[in-house]
Image (cartoon, coloured by chain):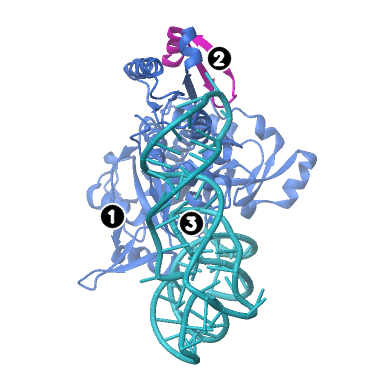
Chain colours: A blue, B cyan
Amino acid sequence: MRLSQYFLPTLRENPSEAQIVSHRLMLRAGMVRQSSAGIYSWLPLGHRVLKKVEQIVREEQDRAGAQELLMPTIQPAELWRESGRYDDYGKEMLRITDRHEREMLYGPTNEELITEIVRASIKSYRDLPKNLYHIQWKFRDEVRPRFGVMRGREFLMKDNYSFDLDAKGARHSYNKMFIAYLRTFARMGLKAIPMRADTGPIGGDLSHEFQILAETGESAVFVDKAFLDVDLLNVNVDYDDQAAVQRVVDDCTRFYAATDEKHDAAQGAKLGDRLVTARGIEVGHIFYFGTKYSAPLKATVAGANGETITLEMGSYGIGVSRLVGAIIEASHDANGIIWPDSVAPFDIGLVNLRSGDAECDAAAGELYAKLQKAGKAVLYDDRGESAGAKFATMDLIGLPWQAVIGPRGVAAGKVEIKRRATGEKLELPTDEALARLAG
RNA sequence: CGGAGCGUAGCGCAGCCCGGUAGCGCAUCAGUCUGGGGGACUGGGGGUCGCGGGUUCAAAUCCCGCCGCUCCGACCA
């Protein structure tokens, strides 16, 4: 993509409404624009990141055996009356009336809808277990949206729902998601710590939140220092091996870690100076809640002996749009964003320091074509801006690699490449630079 | 939902107290010079001062109402 043609409205100054770093940088880097409180448009650069994050989530869900579907954003109030949550949910739920005066709502979550789908179509114990997910926009009418995309009212969320015959099967479904979550966050360069969590209005008796430690986190968290050394980034296991899966989960929960609501002061005190108090950004939440929805909604199947079995359910959420902000909170410096390779909107930023100069244009154009041919996503800054402006833009938008072509380098047959994360710069002969970047 | 603050050009702000018909920096457009970390100069364009009402000869400025946004707290992926 040529930057001269790309829609990338960067801002030199900080918009006054943005208080935290990820919000400021997303606005400045031209990733999002606010439409109204807590509701954002995703501009091309932000949209690319959102899609990358979404795709990683999708791949790890698929790997763990979940199946993707897509449910609507608008749901009938009727269903929510069946589960009893229509009144429980309160003002956070956006209620809508259609032209026929039917009561509808913009879904804040999908337990009712998925349960209806399953109860209508799954009738036999032989059809279980099932784990179904979708990645869809949700709306929760927060009293006080803030922190940009991290606490919006409209947000993109992956949510899935497991259906099992018994508690043992449900536990395994839960454990698989636990591991899928660790893998998902690790692929985004994030260390998300699983913590025993409050189950909230969704209910249930087994729940973990996945928290990224960051100063701007919304809630206080308490962690055993030893936990910070546990390798959560290289989890790999055969999902069908129930015992092995359980061992991994046990291993990753062996140290104390709790959110504010679940924190046990006495247990924390026992840790002494091993207790770390920090703040966390919640990027995922998993629940096992048994028959909380399947019972009132009558989601049952026939068992082997013709008996009626009420389904055991769990639900699992990942805040996809929130993750984009969370990644920035975890990875930035004074000059801008530092994207982990896996979610970067482009792999390489190619800077032509002297657009309009025949030799520079030719060298940059050639490198641009070759990198693209090698399968790399390249943002080519071919604008007539000054060198400083181009460097500042590249640092701001945080592409993992920068390749710089200028008259000095062209004369010597060299290209300078810079790693955004470390600032390390290397001046290499053109073909070596190409090999390095294309590798 | 309680408390506070702010709405003036795309962004950041001044002007408001003490009424006289709008200004600065950045961005933007044209041109010239520049050219390895948001460069310089010259000349342009862009604002029903959030909306509605009131006071006044005259309102960005004073008064009333509304709307929006932000911050602190209680609540949430």
- The residue that mark 1 highlights is A116
Q: Which mark is residue A426?
A: 2
Q: Secondary structure at mark 3?
A: loop
Q: Amino acid at mark 1?
A: Glu
Q: Are marks 2 and 1 in contact (CB under 8 Å)?
A: no
Separation (CA) of disc 2 from disc 1: 58 Å
Q: Is residue B77 left or right of residue A259?
A: left
Q: Is residue A166 visible?
A: no
- Write the start and end of the magenta stretch as one range: A414-439
- The residue that mark 3 highlights is A203
Whether residue A425 appears in magenta in the rendering, the answer is yes
Q: Amino acid at mark 2?
A: Leu
Does A152 appear above or below A228? below
Q: Are marks 2 and 3 on the same chain?
A: yes
Task: Say whether disc 2 or disc 1 marks the residue closer to the N-terminus.
Answer: 1
User: Mark 3 falls within which chain?
Assistant: A
Q: Amino acid at mark 3?
A: Gly
Residue at 55% in and 14% down: A426
